[in-house]
């Protein structure tokens, strides 16, 4: 082997959740010791919900509801299609979870969590699953869901992985909500953010032009 070359012994392959924890900046733009990380996590998952893949939610204007439950916890609900056919467990879900590549931003957020709860439903049939990090503690459980379809994910970020005394920003307008002309021009949507810490509410509706 020539000097400067490397072989397979020098290549480290990480599973998805380990990759997120080692390089969170690739997913959320900042490092683990950055005070902006909790806010960026919320911002990124909201942005992905606003701009879903065409096959995931076509054609409609996404409706997204966000609840800030605490300094390091939040839930996000959208009306996007349950990607699990008839709400069966997706074959592509990470580690047997209900979060697959279509929900990669939520899966990345779950990797930084100590507890995540995923609920999906479609036409009265739903599935519910609890995760530790991104790893399921058990298989999905069925329940009778509401009509229509949607997904709710509740995430409790793990304080042990973050710098001390960090929190999701109390300025709700910084959470996300999509920025720039692209948001209003090409992605009609409605986003509501409720902050239960101070009973604050922010709502933004953008219509396509």
Image: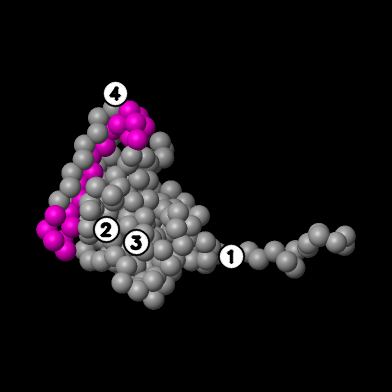
Q: CA distance from mark 2 to mark 3?
A: 8 Å
| Residue 37 higher or lower than 180, as above or below | below
For mark 1, give the secondary structure. Answer: loop
Compared across the picture, whether 182 is left or right of 27 comes to left
**Which residue corresponds to mark 2?**
169
Residue 18 seen by the camera: yes
- Of the residues tagged 4 and 1, which is closer to the observer? 4
- Of the residues tagged 1 and 3, which is closer to the observer? 3
Disc ID at residue 38: 3
Residue 89, position as x, y percentages in the image: 40, 57
Choose the circle earlier in sequence order: 3 or 4. 3
Q: CA distance from mark 4 to mark 1?
A: 43 Å
- Of the residues tagged 1 and 2, which is closer to the observer? 2
Disc ID at residue 14: 1
Query: Quick one: 140 or 159, which is closer to the camera?
Result: 159
Query: Quick one: 52 or 181, which is closer to the camera?
Result: 181
Which quarter of the figure is the C terminus placed in?
A: top left
Q: Is residue 192 magenta?
A: yes
Residue 20, position as x, y percentages in the image: 49, 62
Q: Quadrant of residue 41?
A: bottom left
Q: Is residue 87 magenta?
A: no
Query: Quick one: 147 or 41, which is closer to the camera?
Result: 41
């Amino acid at each position: 082997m020539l000097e400067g070359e490397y072989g397979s012994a020098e290549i480290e392959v990480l599973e998805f959740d380990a990759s997120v924890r080692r390089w969170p900046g690739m997913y959320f733009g900042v490092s683990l010791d950055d005070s902006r990380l909790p806010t960026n996590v919320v911002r990124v998952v909201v942005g992905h919900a606003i701009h879903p893949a065409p096959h995931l939610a076509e054609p409609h204007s996404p409706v997204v509801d966000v609840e800030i439950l605490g300094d390091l916890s939040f839930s996000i609900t959208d009306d996007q299609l349950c990607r699990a056919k008839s709400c069966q467990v997706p074959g592509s879900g990470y580690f047997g979870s209900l979060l697959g590549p279509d929900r990669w931003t939520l899966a990345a957020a779950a990797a930084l969590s100590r507890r995540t709860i995923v609920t999906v439903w479609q036409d009265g049939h739903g599935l519910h699953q609890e995760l530790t990090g991104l790893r399921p503690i058990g298989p999905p459980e069925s329940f009778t869901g509401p009509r229509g379809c949607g997904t709710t994910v509740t995430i409790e970020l793990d304080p042990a992985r973050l710098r001390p005394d960090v929190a999701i920003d109390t300025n709700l307008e910084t959470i996300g909500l999509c920025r720039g002309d692209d948001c209003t021009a090409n992605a009609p949507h409605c986003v509501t953010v409720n902050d239960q810490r101070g009973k604050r509410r922010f709502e933004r509706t953008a219509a396509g032009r």
